[in-house]
Structures are given as structure tokens and as C-alpha cells.
Image: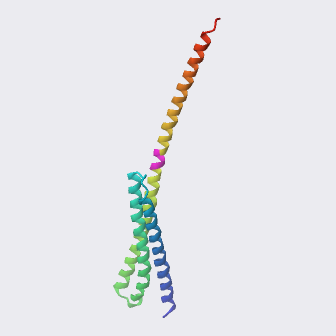
Amino acid sequence: MDADFWISLAICLVLVGAALWLIRVHWQHWQEVDAQPGLSDRDRNHLRRRHRRRFQTSTMLGLVGVAILLGRLFPPEDGHLIPLLYWLGVALLVCWVALLALADMLSTRLHYSSRQHQDDLERLKLQAQLRRATREEQARQGTSGKTGSSDQPE
């Protein structure tokens, strides 16, 4: 066995090992999230879709690792169309992984940006209620202070 085989095997093992570890981490995280009773439907749906994307990405990462090792079955020196199509398929798989990763980043950013906006609106609403309650309290204290001073003779 030549050095290229060992390099291909090492890349395969690293990618498959990383994929298996990521799948395990995603699964454990999803179990924790799924057990949380206080999540809103919107948050739960976002986290479910995120889990599905990440699980799919991790699985395809492992497939890319196996494909790199299996690619040795199609030596490019043969001059056939099969190795070209095979590696084109592997490249498309890598592009799909990259697109899923970008979609995950964009989705997460949009979700939490929306959540931040909702939290900011709620905070502003609560601050307005607090200011209104404070003004009402000050007005009551000011009114009771005026009636107390009118009882005294001038």
C-alpha cells in the first residue's frame, strides 16, 4: 500500500470520527432541548430545524470522508469519465455541506435577531409602563401634599 492510501485513510478516519462525534453532540443537545417544557412553539420549531440541518451536515461530512477513501477505486489515470463524475459528485456533496452550514448560520442569525427585536419591544413597553406608574405615583403624592398644605391657615 502506497503513501496516498494511508493519507486517504487518515482523512477518512478523521472526517468520519468528527462526523460521529458531531452527530452524538447534536443528538444529546436535541434531547436536552426537547425535554424543556417552557420553550415557545417558535423556538422549538427553530431548534428542530437547526438540529435537522446540523445532523444532515454532520452525516454528509462522514460521507465525504468515506468518499475520499472510496475515490481510490477510480484512479484518474484511466482517462474514463467515471472518475470525473465521481469526484464531481463528491464536490457537489461538499458544496451542499457548505450551503447547509451557511443556511444554518443565516437562520440562526435571523431567529435571534428577531428574538432580540421582540425583547427590545417588550423592554420598551415595560419601561413605558414603569414611567407611567411613576408619574401617577408622583401625581398622587403631589396631590396629597397640596391638600395637606391647604388645611393650615394662611
Q: How many numbered tags mark residues here?
A: 0
- Residue 129 is left or right of residue 84, and the answer is right
Please identify the dominant SS of the magenta region.
helix
Q: Give the range drawn in magenta.
A: 114-118
Q: Residue at x 48, y 45 (%)?
A: 119
Q: In the rendered view, would you say 89 is above or below 116?
A: below
Q: Position of residue 17 (x, y in %)?
A: 48, 77
Q: Which residue is drawn at 41% across and 87% down?
A: 76
Question: Does the segment drawn in magenta span residue 139?
Answer: no
Residue at the image point whose x is 43% and y is 67% from the top? 27
Q: In which quarter of the image is residue 85?
A: bottom left
Image spot of residue 10 (x, y percent): 50, 83
How is the model colour-coded? rainbow
Identify the image quadrant of residue 154: top right
Q: Is residue 119 left or right of residue 145?
A: left
Judge by depth and name the residue closer to the eye, 154 or 127. 154
| Towards the viewer: 27 or 92 | 27
Q: In x, y percent, where is residue 7?
A: 51, 85
Residue for point 38% across, 52% down: 41
Image coords of residue 31 (percent x, y): 43, 63
Q: Residue furthest bottom?
A: 1
Q: Residue furthest right?
A: 154
Q: Is residue 21 above or below residue 29?
A: below
Instruction: Identify whether 5 is placed above or below 21.
Output: below
